[in-house]
Image: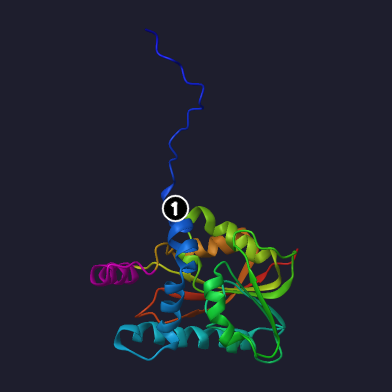
Amino acid sequence: MARAVSNAPITEPVNYDDEVASYELATKQKYQDPSIASWYLKGYEGRLKLSSLASYIIARREQRCIGKALERCSPRPSRLLDVPCGTGKLAQVLSQQGREVLAADISMEMMVLAKTSYEGQPGFRGFIRCDVTKLPFADESFDTVVCLRLIHLIPPHLRRDIINELARISSYRLIVSYGLTTRFQRIRLKLRKMITGGISAPHPVRLDVARQDFEEVGLALTDSFSVLPLLSCERLFVLEKVKA
């Protein structure tokens, strides 16, 4: 007897690229978990504990570096975007000196917690939920865009697209942090993974790769700050758009 032939379409198995999955699942979805958002906030704002000491110290250093970067900028920033704003770590430092600040993140859960830090700050213009890969702003909507603690989570195939998108909406300046890989940092990250089982910077890059990112999208490096070399591979870059 001949077997009946099904007319149902044949569905090929989906082969997810590891890098896409790492961004879609490990980054985008992770920080939309209320428990993760709460854990992130407690890492630098909660009661100081030995387990969160490193996070607390790094957060304070990040705030100081951002503040110093803004003070050195000329002309002074006046309309800023904080993306991703997370739980509002930079609210106070960005809102000084009469600056207008809009905060954006893909995570509503993070922004709910950021309200305490941001609301009431002079010049705060509100929150907007969006994906950094496709920002809902017109070209040159802000004179300064601040992007802290994101790029080290971004896989290589998306990293430069995101830098380009951040540069597109800025009329003058981008302040962004990268995770930089050096021999010391590779050893430190391996030891950290052995001890904690976690990976704090899944996609660090060499300094020359970061510089190439900037050049490819028309950004000139004007200043940089190492956040805390012994505890973090994070480095903050101040970039200005190259005018034709």
Query: Horizontal and vertical percent for residue 173?
Result: 66, 74
Q: In the image, 239: left or right of 188?
A: right
Q: Vertically, is 129 above or below 16?
A: below
Disc 1 marks which amino acid? Ala
Q: In the image, 97: left or right of 49?
A: right
Query: Horizontal and vertical percent for residue 211?
Result: 53, 65
**Does 7 appear in magenta?**
no
Q: Vertically, is 170 above or below 10?
A: below
Query: Horizontal and vertical percent for residue 129?
Result: 62, 68
Badge 1 element:
helix
- Secondary structure of the magenta portion, mostly? helix
Q: Nearer the viewer, residue 111 or 141?
A: 111
- The quarter of the displayed image where residue 99 is located: bottom right
Q: In the image, 133: left or right of 47?
A: right
Q: In the image, 63: left or right of 36?
A: right
Q: Is residue 133 visible to the viewer in this orientation of the structure?
A: yes
Q: Vertically, is 117 above or below 166?
A: below
Q: Is residue 58 visible to the viewer in this orientation of the structure?
A: no
- Who's the residue at 30% across and 72% down the image? 188
Q: Vertically, is 69 above or below 240?
A: below
| Magenta residues, start to end | 183-200
Looking at the picture, the colour scheme in use is: rainbow
Q: Nearer the viewer, residue 237 or 113?
A: 113
Disc 1 marks which residue?
A: 21
- The quarter of the displayed image where residue 68 is located: bottom right
**Does 185 appear in magenta?**
yes
- Who's the residue at 59% across and 88% down the image? 93
Residue lying farthest to the top in this orientation: 1
The crowd level at tag 1 (other Cα within 10 Å; few <14, some 14-19, many 20+) is: few
